[in-house]
Amino acid sequence: MNEDTLELAQFVVIPLAIFIPLFREITDISNEIIELYKTAHTNKRICGVLLDRVQAAEAAVKNLIIREKERPEFFTGPNNVIIRNLVGVMKNIKEFVKEICELKGLRKYLVSKGMEERFKELTREFDGYMSNLNFTITIEIRAQIERDNLAIRIDQEETNQLLFQLAESINFNQKKVNSDISYIKEDVMSVKNDVVEIKNQFILMISNPLRKRVEKFEGG
């Protein structure tokens, strides 16, 4: 295929029906991220700025469906490939949100700045595809970057504080367990001593009458 053919292929319009399954995936992913955001226990701000991006993509494709006849130049093979790539990075964003919105999923990002690096990697990739498609993100890029950085900083501080409190709680509970074990040992020793004392008293109780009988028998 020569360069002229490749250039021509870029402008060949393909049916909207080819795009619909991809658009549907974008909507489904957006809805799933909304639910994750609603129930997020950690890093809610980071989840929020990612949700903003995903919803921007969803709004853009909904607009394309409505204005299909006004935007025929969009529905080309190259844009179909970019949309597929956009769906792929959105799936990765969903998995990232799923991991960081719960404390148990944060383990893989607690080393160094793994979470921040992954966040920037995903947003850079997402923003690149949006730009290639000429989709506009509602917030100006510089303001969005500042918001991203603020979300990362605040959420990381809160996560670190949460982990510190969790560690303190574990230490406190461990000390309490150790203290309880010590008390249990003392109680066991006390019970053991009581049993020995009862045993001695019982032996003494049955031995005294027996001794008196023996003495009486010997005296008689």
Image (cartoon, rainbow, N blue to C red):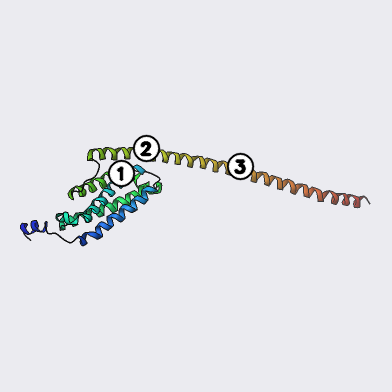
Pair 1/2: label in front: 1
Q: Is residue 2 left or right of residue 61?
A: left
Q: Is residue 70 left or right of residue 8?
A: right
Q: Earlier in the sequence, mark 3 or mark 2?
A: 2
Residue corresponding to mark 2: 157
Quadrant in the picture for the N terminus:
bottom left
Which image quadrant is residue 112 in? top left
Q: Residues within 10 Å of mark 2 (few under 14, many from 20)?
A: few
Residue corresponding to mark 1: 49
Task: Measure how far apart labels 1 and 2 are at the Cα level.
Answer: 17 Å
When the figure is inspected, residue 214 is found, relative to residue 21, above or below; the finding is above
Q: Residues within 10 Å of mark 3 (few under 14, many from 20)?
A: few
Task: Measure how far apart labels 3 and 2 are at the Cα level.
Answer: 39 Å
- Residue 158 horizontal/vertical position (percent): 39, 39
Three-letter code, disc 2? Glu
Secondary structure beneath dot 3 equals helix
Residue corresponding to mark 3: 183
Q: Is residue 216 left or right of residue 141?
A: right
Three-letter code, disc 1? Val
Secondary structure beneath dot 2 equals helix
Pair 3/1: label in front: 1
Name the foreground residue: 64 vs 118: 64
- Residue 90 horizontal/vertical position (percent): 27, 52
Task: Measure how far apart labels 3 and 1 are at the Cα level.
Answer: 52 Å
Q: Is residue 117 left or right of residue 157?
A: left
